[in-house]
Amino acid sequence: MSGRTEISRRSFLKTSAAVGGGLVVGFFVPAGLGGRRALAQALSEGEGAGEGVGAGGAAPAVLPPANAFLRIGSDESVTVLLAHSEMGQGIWTTLPMLVNEELDADWARFRVEHAPAAAVYGSTAYHVQMTGGSTTTWSELDRYRQVGAVTRTLLVAAAAARWGVAPGDCRTDRGHVVCGERRASYGSLAEDAAKLPPPARVDLKPASDWKVIGRPTRRLDTPEKTTGRAQFGLDVRLPGLLTAVVARPPTFGGKVKSFDATAARAVPGVRAVVEIPAGVAVAGDHFWAAKRGRDALKVEWDEGPHAGIDSARIREDLRARARTAGVRAASGGDAARALAAGGPAGSAGVAGAAKIALVAEYSVPYLAHAPMEPLNCTVRRTAAGCEVWTGTQFQTVDQARVAEIFGLKPEQVSIHTTFLGGGFGRRANLASDFVAEAAQVARQLDQPVKLVWTRDDDIRGGYYRPLAVHRLEGTLDEHGAPLAWRQRIATQSILAGTPFTAMIKDGIDPTCVEGASDSPYVTAIPHHRVELHTVETGVPVLWWRSVGHTHTAFAVESFLDELAHAARRDPLELRRALLAKAPRVRAVLELAAEKAGWGSPPPPGRARGLAVHESFGSIVAQVAEVGVEGGQIRVHRVVVAVDCGICINPLGVRAQMESAVAFGLGAALHGQVTIERGRVVESNFHDYRILRLYEMPRVEVHIVESHEKPGGAGEPGTPPVAPAVANAVFALTGKRLRDLPFRLA
Amino acid sequence: MRLMVNGQEHEVAVPEDMPLLWVLRDVLGLTGTKFGCGMAQCGACTVLVDGKPLRSCVRPAASMTGQAITTIEGLSAHGEHPVQVAWAEVDVVQCGYCQSGQILAAVALLAAKPQPSDADIDAALGGNLCRCGTYQRIRGAVHRAAELMRS
């Protein structure tokens, strides 16, 4: 993570003059090496990539050259281009921090922009341009610091040449190069620096010299987000822009049989009604015209093969499957034999003379992501190709999809990433659904079009966190130590049938079992086995903040709690014992327990529950303090301990922990998408409830000081919430909540 | 119809039933007011009308003639309203989409109750959803804004 970085071999990095004067530092993927392979190769060799596009990339002044990562303007501006999307997680601030750790510029001068879609901005973790898996900050730790280091080296070289001194005699001081009495600002050096060849290698500071990384830093996007100036996809305005909404079939996989647009066309402001694969689109002068037009449409639907879907029946089917053997995902010892020897199975809490056997089933429902900004995308055809404005987590995937729809090459499609009004995985859609719909409408019109999903479209339009059932069987030995653990998971695959199918190995989609098959608890039990049943239901599913961990953590941490209570052991003590070989996980759990006052009496009428879970490279433990008021669960306080390795921005990590608690708690208390007769029952925030202010517990966050490789921050706080609350409710009431969302009665 | 928005009068020709939200956004270009649910369930579309919070997604603009409408763009020239300052100090925002509505709801609360309790804040802003879960910081920022407004 520190030390010397070679950037020489393929000369991937080059500099150029900025439009309007200044320095651009970028990377590029060399011709002939081709997109993602070259990038992967370059990065695996620890190199950056890049050749600057000259000032000839001048076209519209708002567009940077397609390889820029950083621009130093003659006006002293420092502009960082994000290869990833800002969707609330705070990378608008953390990536510039990484740059400035090496650059030493004036923080007040920083500006941030989303990069366009191009191979050079491919994720160093996934090799497509995307934002997800809680990867952005750690995966960019080297690349963005390198950019800062290269730029600083060039600015120092420019100053040294100007003054006729050795670069080694110069230092930098917050946006200036200094040598003795001489001092020159970065902006005044930028044009000279742009003429210099990039350095063959740069030294990155050792962690002990870091001044920016680790310092609590407020967000850079606050000014625009508190004044209404921030541009989200829905805020895009263009001359002649039409707004479109789509009437979609009431069932998944349904199709238009026929439609009558007479009444829709008669609505004032409606300009066009066109059919697309997803349904019938009505385009008008503004949203209201399009929406009224859609209301007036008469569509006859072919409801397709999934008109009989019933989520309660799916749940029962999964329960039945989970009672039979599935495909092995992980195993150690002989769980089947140990369970058979463990006494009568089939009911919870049956104690033998020396042993205890437990069986329990847990279930979680389908969940919509429901970002506050409804899905939307704007497409404009141009002479050279087309332009797309959208808040997306999947730039190059969307670009390829739009190119395919228009019969263009991907590079003829410009993607302008706006701020995302939340994503949570929904805007990383493998089929680019909302983007494709906009392109399909725009292809049939002569005007640019903004396609907007209403909230009903969002809740009912699919791509849910999969419904899942876990059946757990376990035994305890005569000392109350877990002896056998069998976990059978039945759920849908997110990856099957997508471009990520190759990640499915030996019949196991890792997103179905992550957090169970690799759980330090499970693997520490002498006889353990995790199995998977993969079902197809016709319900479209997708990653939802923390993906498989959303249900595996609930099942694992709940069942562990059941075992602890059955053994009459303190839930913390049993966990500590099992985590003997996972000291980092154990330390996080202990920290949360200590800060929460575990072992001391809780306030009257309350009880505590705990859970710890590792995901996306970080470990999060939570202790929930819970009461029951008027028959409702009331979560008063959640103490969070997190070990995310090296913490780039503690203020941001705290925010993500608070955020994840709210997200997970909303799901635990309320979240549920129900399907009856093929139709989604819920439609808006009145029946698809998310957490509200008055339900928000006091959240206290404790960050473990760590020098380990950094992990993610966006997702890992979500998985422990539901089990921590369920375990607290059990401690308070004796009632074990095994189905989400929680119902006390 | 004539609408008074952020101290400026606008003459607009729109359908009688068109909600104020879409007139603000799609006709006047004031996109700081957000669309979240379309049925007064989330508060993203909150504006102030004569100082009181209003869900603009369900109220026809035609019913608003003659009333002083304030959107986030009209709250201050450069974000210097104490509530906006407090929001920055407390580092409230995440995705930011709901924050126009949150801020205007907080402004209305503080006008009515200059020293709100947590319970007052929960009650006044309970209808403003935030999917990023910035609620704890919102509470803190409302208290901070109250301090700033007192001094």
Image: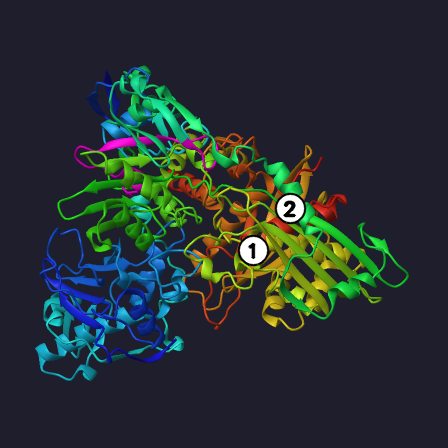
Q: Position of residue A325 (x, y in %)?
A: 69, 57
Name the N-terminal-most of marks 1 and 2: 2
Please provide percent x and percent y for residue B32: 30, 36
Pointer 1 indicates a residue of which chain? Answer: A
Residue A220 seen by the camera: no
Q: Nearer the viewer, residue A614 or B98?
A: A614
Judging depth in this view, the residue of A240 and B36 nearest the camera is A240
Question: Mark 1: which amino acid?
Answer: Cys
Numbered label attached to residue A512: 1
Q: Which residues are magenta?
A: A226-255
Residue in front for this viewpoint, A369 or A151: A369
Circle number at residue A683: none
Q: Are marks 1 and 2 in contact (CB under 8 Å)?
A: no
Q: Secondary structure at mark 2?
A: helix
Please provide percent x and percent y for residue A386: 20, 46
Magenta: predominant secondary structure element?
Answer: loop
Q: Is residue A358 left or right of residue A718?
A: right
Quadrant containing the N terminus of chain A is bottom left
Label 1 – label 2 distance at C-alpha: 13 Å
Q: Is residue A120 magenta?
A: no
Q: Which type of secondary structure does the marked residue at label 1 adopt?
A: helix
Which corner quadrant of the image does residue A634 belong to?
Answer: top right
In the rendered view, would you say A689 is above or below A86?
above
The furthest residue to the right = A353
Residue corresponding to mark 2? A318
Left or right, B127 with respect to A556, comes to left
Determine crowd level at label 1: few under 14, some 14-19, many 20+ residues with C-alpha closer than 10 A.
many
Q: Quadrant of the C terminus of chain A?
A: top right
Q: Quadrant of residue A562?
A: bottom right
Return the chain for callout 2.
A
